[in-house]
Amino acid sequence: MKKKVVLLALAFSFVFMGLPSTAGWLSANALAAEKNNGKVIVYNWSEYIPQEVLDEFTKETGVEVVYSTYETNDSMYAKIKLLRGKGYDLVCPSTYYLHLMIEEGLFKKFDHSKLSNIVNLDPQLMNPSYDPGNEYSIPYMWGSVGLLINTAYVKPENARSFKDLLRPEYKGKIILTDDMRDCYGMAMHAVGKSANSTDPDDIKAGYEFLKALHPSVVTFDVSAVKQAFISEEVIIGTSWNGDALVAQQEKPELEFVYPEDGALVWVDSFAMPVGAENVENAHKFVNFLLRPEIAKKCQEEYMYSTPNLKTLDLLSAEKRANRTLVPTGDELKNAEYLLNYGGKTLQIYKNYWEKARSGL
Ligand code: N2P
């Protein structure tokens, strides 16, 4: 950033001194940044791409990034649907919303010939059932919902599964993710059901769990989870693994647990809303994020798992061995991907969720 300011100041001083073209002195990158190559309008999860990376993209390409953020898939979906896919060039839905939005025709296809860095992505995370060939979605980050505990107060053996949240000693000290799929998914696993179940009896069982848990919950939240743990307002609850790792940097006694009853896994992928106007720049932006060293910057800032195999190679041995970040053992044994379960079932979940969240 500082460097950019210095370069601009230099350029201005040349203009004022009436000197001829500065092309010989300025780097190719700086020159590119002076050209206005248009923009790309990105709507993404908050705390997901560092400002430094956005600046670097603009500096290199001259493309302005118009960037805004959301806290949940639900709010992103509501907006894109309302605008009928206009107004944004890229969004970053999780698996199940991606699935739904592809079905609803809200996205347009990527041109893979413009995404040369796609080869860096882990084949295991490519070609999902809901988007064969990744025509509509390019994985950006992946992670899980598990338990976060403060080991100063919670013994790991008393927090092995989501079910343990019901233990009386946690009453008034619990935070839950304020997101229907993540939170309800946790409840479904706690009662031994699939988080993607469409069976009304299963869904009711999940609701009963949430209802029983409600008196113990201090807050439902997505944006202040780290803070709630750091300030010790809560000592146990559900969390995304990235948030857990970032909070841990400040409070080492925090520990992320992959619950025995099964974590919930998501892959967040970039997709182009059907009304996207800056398609060329959207491709440039995604391809830039797929560069190993750029994906590394994003990974290091927010601590989610990267789908970029070349980036994994660049991480320190300590990081690669961190099972919260790179779950390669038993951690994901009973884990489940959240998938779209369709309109009628969604409504049943929503009705129960509204009630459960209000403690009714
Ligand atoms: C980062 C958002 C994590 C995304 N703040 C969870 N799908």
Image: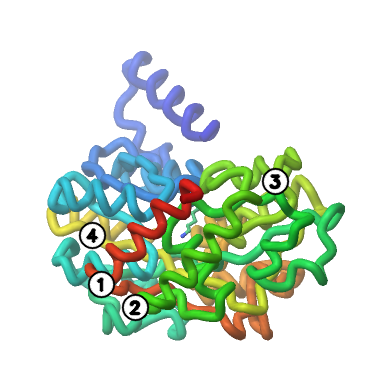
Q: Position of residue 46 (x, y in %)?
A: 46, 46
* Amino acid, disc 3: Gly
Left or right of 206: which side holds 281?
Answer: left
Disc 2 versus disc 4: nearer the observer: 2
Q: Nearer the viewer, residue 56 or 327?
A: 327
Q: Nearer the viewer, residue 13 or 126?
A: 126
Residue at 48% x, 72% y is 205
Q: Which residue is mark 1?
A: 342
Spatial CA span between label 2 and label 3: 31 Å
With respect to residue 114, does 301 lie above or below? above
Q: Which mark is residue 198?
A: 2
Q: Nearer the viewer, residue 250 or 96?
A: 96
Crowding near the residue tagged with mark 2, few <14, some 14–19, many ≥20 C-alpha atoms within 10 Å: some
Spatial CA span between label 1 and label 4: 22 Å
Residue at 62% x, 78% y is 261
Q: Nearer the viewer, residue 73 or 303?
A: 73
Q: Which residue is mark 3?
A: 172
Q: Which mark is residue 26?
A: none
* Amino acid, disc 4: Met
Pointer 2 or 3: first along the chain: 3
Q: Secondary structure at mark 3?
A: loop
Left or right of 38: which side holds 295?
Answer: right
Q: Which residue is mark 4?
A: 272
Task: Mark 2 and mark 4 in contact? Answer it, CB < 8 Å.
Answer: no
Pointer 1 or 4: first along the chain: 4
